[in-house]
Amino acid sequence: MPPASNTTDGVTEGSEVTDAEGPAADLPADPAAGTATGSAVADYRAPVWVRLWWTPLVLFAVVGLLAAGAGIRALIDRPPADSSVDVGFARDMSEHHSQAVQMAMVEFSHGGDAAIRSVAQDIALGQQREIGIMATWLSGWGRTETSAREPMAWMAGDSGATGDGRHSAHEGMGMGAGAEADAGSADTSVRMPGMASEAELARLAGASGRDLDIQFLTLMIRHHRGGIAMAQYAWLHADSDKVRTLARVMVGNQDREITQMQADLERLGAPRA
């Protein structure tokens, strides 16, 4: 009898297994070779000299696009000039707001009417928050919070109507000559529209009760009118979207607060401001 063969997994012991056996031996090394698709790819492959010529051209185009994008980004991120409406508004409105906070805290601490003290608190908190926003802008632009420039120089171009038919800050609020005169004080210590003089601040600090309430409302209404004129100009003329947006919000908030404070004056039996 012939000796039994030992098998493992169908492979006979002692038999040769080579890579050339079976159908796999007939397969080309390149899976695409020998097929219609592979032949087409081989036929239409660009010559080496074309590929070498296109490679640096493509790289040059990519570098050019990146450089152009960086240039555009630099223009977009360029901080506004020191003399711009954006910077001037942030500086001057911060100072304007600071006086409003000062007056509001006097009323909040010593006023006689609870509702008016609440209005004063809202004004102080809201305007202090806006001071913080504008200080952040100035820091991000690399600008100081104060300047040797003349206050309100950024509004020097206010000449009535704007180029797109909109009206200037003063006309937009319907402020006539009398209202504009009232928006400031004859005192030379007043730096911006609506701000109280040193003498007015001293009288406010020395008052209490109903007298303080009336003085506060009268001064703050005038102060708000001046602030609205400044904010409207920035709304119309600032370059930065965020500056225009905050200016627009200021106009709306202070206009509503004026309406409330006029009603409070009437409730106290005092003349409207």
Image (tube, grey):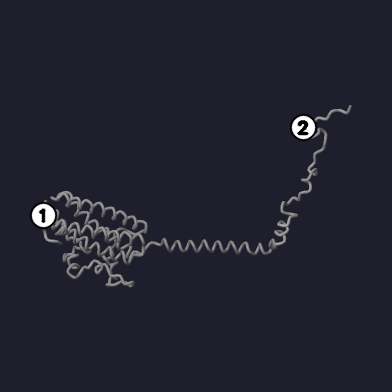
**Where's residue 233, x and y in %?**
29, 66
> Which of the labelled discs sits on residue 237, or is there none?
none
Residue 127's image quarter?
bottom left
Crowding around mark 2 (Cα neighbors within 10 Å: few <14, some 14 to 19, many 20+) is: few
- In the image, is 145 to the left or to the right of 36? left
Q: Which numbered circle lies on residue 211? A: 1
The residue that label 2 is drawn on is 8
Q: Residue 64: name its quadrant.
A: bottom right
Task: Write the residue at 83% across / 33% down.
Answer: 14
192 with respect to 83 (left or right)? left
The amino acid marked with disc number 2 is Thr
Q: Position of residue 180 (x, y in %)?
A: 20, 68
Q: Nearer the viewer, residue 202 or 49?
A: 49
Q: Residue at x 69, y 61 (%)?
A: 45
For residue 244, side relative to residue 61 (left or right):
left
Identify the image quadrant of the C terminus: bottom left
What residue do we see at 74% from left, 55% from top?
A: 35
Q: Quadrant of the N terminus?
A: top right
Residue that lies at the very extreme toward the front in this rendered image: 1
Labels 1 and 2: the sequence-earlier one:
2
Given residues 213 and 44, the one toward you in this image is 44
Picture coordinates of residue 71, whole percent (x, y): 47, 63
Residue 255, relative to residue 109: is it above or below?
below
**Residue drawn at (15%, 56%) of the image:** 264
Q: Nearer the viewer, residue 140 or 160?
A: 160
Q: CA distance from mark 1 to mark 2?
A: 111 Å
